[in-house]
Amino acid sequence: TAGKPFNWIDCDVHLPENSAPCLVVCRTWSMTENAWKEGTLMILRYLPKEHRWNTSGVADVTHWMPMPELPETEGDIYD
């Protein structure tokens, strides 16, 4: 719903229990800037059996949340 806040979960407090896609906030390493970039949004899956996120780059996931529902639209553009 419009104006509803996101419920971010701190990775130090709790991690996903399955490998469903999640919206995550992370720090990523920028090779071109040779520095960490804060607040990058990504869609990743947590791999509980491997105790890691499915990222191929250097990313430090700090917070996550289940994927929000898609917006309601007229027609079937998401089906």
Image: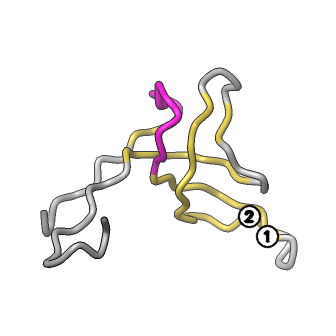
Could you say where residue 41 lies in the image, as x and y percent from the top left? 52, 63
Instruction: Please identify the quadrant where the N terminus is shown.
Output: bottom left
Task: Write down the residue under mark 2.
Answer: 36
Q: Which residues are magenta?
A: 12-22
Type of amino acid under label 1 = Ser
Would residue 28 be counted in the magenta stretch?
no
Task: Write down the residue under mark 1.
Answer: 30
Would residue 17 be counted in the magenta stretch?
yes
Please give left or right for residue 72 compared with residue 67 in the image.
left
Mark nearest the camera among 2 and 1 is: 1
Type of amino acid under label 2 = Trp
Q: How many marks?
A: 2
Instruction: Please identify the quadrant where the C terminus is shown.
Output: bottom left
Could you say where residue 14 lies in the image, as x and y percent from the top left? 45, 28
Of callouts 2 and 1, the N-terminal one: 1
- Badge 1 marks a residue whose secondary structure is strand
Please give left or right for residue 26 compared with residue 67 in the image.
right
